[in-house]
Amino acid sequence: MLDWLRKNLGYIGVTAILLGFFFQSLANQSDLRVQIAYSAGIAMLLSYLFLNAGSLKKDLFSRQGQAGSIAGATTLLVVGILALLNFLNFKNSWRVDLTEEQLHALSSQSRNVASSLNQDIQITAFFGTGGPGQASLDSLLEMMKGFQESGPRIEYSIVDPEQQPTLAEKFEIQRLGQAVLESQGKRETVDLLDFNGRWQADNEERLTNALIKVTRETEKAIYFLQGHGERDIEDSREEGFARVAEELRKQNYRVEKLNLGQQDEIPGDADVIISAGPQVKFLESEVEHLRGFLERGGNLLLLVDPMTDFDMNETFLADYGLRLGNNLVLDVSGVGRLLGLGPAAPLVADYADHPVTKEMTGISTFYPRAQSVETVESVLGYSSQDLMTTSARSWGEMNTEAEEVGFDEGVDQSGPLHLAAIASKTIENDENGPEEGTAGTDDASASQQSPPKEPMAGEEGSGSPAEKTKPKESRFVLFGDSDFATNLYFSEGRNGDALLLTVNWLAEDTELIGIRPRQQTDRRVNLTMGQAQLIKWVAGGLLPLVTLVLGFMVWSSRRAA
């Protein structure tokens, strides 16, 4: 027994060390059993070398021992090189996310927000260590590492509320999985685990929105026009705009409705005005309000569907270098069939070189029942630019009431066509300009200056002369469709991003101009009972039987030979 133990003590020692490594990986910490396993294993290895020193020395200098020594040295060299590479990788980490949705890398919007921080952020996350919650904690640490790499002003700490109950009480923590963001006296709490204790798929978006809230001094105001048949931001049905309003509020915008026919003025705190899907023309008084708003450096987003009574090319749009095509864009590339819409859902994969679309390269959006948009020369000095372009297999159908449609040479507009365009102009912020509603339509009146809009709550009402006279940029974006951003299509492809990026640019929030975090696509395959049975019998019966038959045939042929 003692002789057997002396000969096999080395193998037992190696086994003990491997057990220690297994226990450490399992518990993610070096506890007592790990230390015992390591200590016992090293002691047994040393004892084996001491008790078998003579035989080991004799074997080492034999021919077989020399060959084994070379093999062992080669193995140690390879292991050493791998260890060195692993060490270098740990010190200089570089990762590539190969998933389609980029699930293991921060989105461009999150990186932009983190990198643009001009104040310190402290994130305190309350998580338990070990146990079933370890996977969620690992996900949090990976995400925090990404935020910290993008924004060096972000610091984070992980706190176990059971070990530090006083700190949990200070932050009013209700349950595990809550993270508290603090900056300059402002605090925002985010729930990272659902009520079942599971990691939530949209946590990156939650943290990014919380970063925006704790670092912004004021909310920017976005007003949605009403009174012309526009889409309702409180309507949660398929055709409503409730999802748009929800996403804008997540980005710390204040979203309100505005009926110019009733209120007869544009609020002084308005940063962006949106008219989504108007069915009729604006009244003359409303047009004057919008002209005055733009001349004071305001920003306007207009989304106009085809086949409506909104015919304002000559009375409003053309002055700013924009026109509607008054047609129906059809695309025979086939994407409409995938959406169940036929050719009336043109696909856009060609974007202009502009801040709104710089992050959309390689991304497709589609616009159900859209009309084309054109740029013309502006009499008010606005510079215009096409933004989104359809494929060459599209055209603008002028006869929108025809039962059967096809491209008519000389009548219809051949593709590619533009579905969105922008117009902008630098406005000198002179305090002696016209009041709202006094804007003219010629160059002279357009060059007049107007007083700055009233400050929002929380902003300074006065500033230096340089700040008061700092030039602004009036921005106007025109889409030939509003369906693409409805509740029904907002989450399809990147349609929602197309609208949100436009609003971010209009509001001059450059740090928000980026693709939002994507959630993992559900790739489950739903099989019928017959399909499941077929797979079962093919994989469990037919393939093994074929292998058995082929093996028997090979064996028979070799035996016969």
Image (cartoon, rainbow, N blue to C red):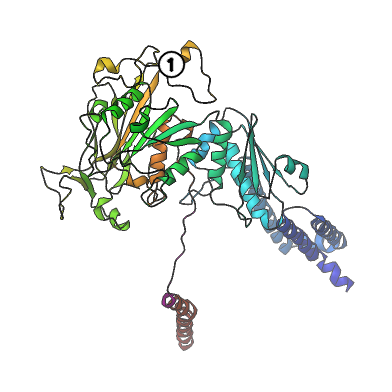
Q: Residues within 10 Å of mark 1 (few under 14, many from 20)?
A: few
Q: Is residue 358 visible?
A: no
Please identify the residue farthest to the front as the structure is shown: 262
Q: Which image quarter: residue 144? A: top right
Residue at image position (61%, 48%) is 192
Residue labelled with disc 1: 470
Q: Is residue 106 visible?
A: yes
Q: Is residue 14 above or below residue 415?
A: below
Please identify the residue farthest to the right as the structure is shown: 2
> Residue 536 colored magenta?
no
Q: Position of residue 380 (x, y in %)?
A: 26, 21
Residue at image position (36%, 50%) is 239
Q: Is residue 357 above or below residue 32?
A: above
Q: Position of residue 493 (x, y in %)?
A: 39, 49
Asked whether, in this view, residue 284 is left or right of residue 172, the answer is: left
Q: Which of these two is toward me, 442 or 209? A: 442
Residue at image position (38%, 27%) is 266
Please identify the residue farthest to the bottom as the structure is shown: 560
Q: Which image quarter: residue 47? A: bottom right
Q: Which of these two is toward me, 41 or 216? A: 216
Q: Is residue 344 above or below residue 500?
A: below
Asked whether, in this view, residue 489 is left or right of residue 375, the answer is: right
Q: Quadrant of the N terminus?
A: bottom right
Label 1 sits on what residue type? Lys
Asked whether, in this view, residue 288 is left or right of residue 523, the answer is: left
> Residue 529 colored magenta?
yes
Q: Which of these two is toward me, 81 or 369? A: 369
Magenta residues (range): 519-531
Q: Main secondary structure of the magenta part?
A: loop
